[in-house]
Image (tube, helix red, strand yellow):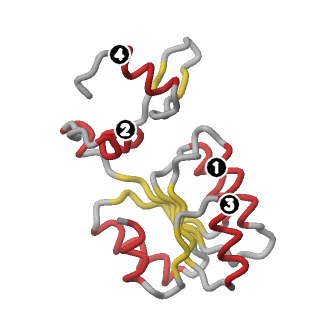
Amino acid sequence: MLQVHPKTVYYWVRTGRLNALTSPGGLLRVRAEDARALCQSAGMPIPAELATVKRRVHVVEPDKTVSRSLVRNLKAKGFDVRTYEDPYEALIATAKEPPELLIIDVRHPGIEASRAISALRRDDNTKRTRVLVWSDIGHDEHSTLLEAGVEAVVPRGDAAALVKAIK
């Protein structure tokens, strides 16, 4: 599919350039999202098999009206979107089936967002998941989240900034 020798793929996995899962039989399995990300970062052409794979996004948003609006906009851009009101449910789903992108409103009672995001960054399966925070937060919390591994913090309600951050 990538038109390279299997030893090259093994080298990429071993050096951390390409994320892979190991099957119970010891075989390496590469997710389509990871192979596509490698092609993009290395300037390689994206094979047709990978170009048609929908990019998965998890959206954590308690407000159903806002959630529907985000889903509509993301689906129009070709994303496979899954929504969650409960951040814990979203984090569990993200760990089980990592999306390309996690958009989370961190203003949920009982969740310490920076610790949750740090945990995602430490996990081999989720460390490459892009995380965007969609929330109105103070400068101190903004800095803490960026240190934890958030790609961007977008002010709540600024759809144009969110679309720009997703690209």
Task: Return the x and y of residue 83 as percentages of the image width and height.
Answer: 52, 65
Q: Dot 2, crowdedness within 10 Å: few (<14), some or many (≥20)?
A: some
Q: What residue is shown at x 43% (from left), y 30% (from top)?
A: 30
Residue position for label 1: 121
Whichever of callouts 1 and 2 sits on the residue coming sooner in the sequence is: 2
Report the residue marked by disc 2.
32
CB under 8 Å between discs 3 and 2: no
The mark nearer the N terminus, 3 or 2, is: 2
Mark linked to residue 148: 3
Query: Quick one: which residue is furthest to the right in this view?
Result: 110
Q: Nearer the viewer, mark 2 or mark 4?
A: 4
- SS for callout 4: helix
* Mark 4 crowd level (few <14, some 14–19, many ≥20, 10 Å Cα): few
Label 3 to label 1, Cα distance in Å? 8 Å
Q: Identity of the amino acid at label 4?
A: Pro
Give the left or right position of residue 63, taking residue 78 as reference. right
Q: Is residue 126 above or below residue 5?
A: below
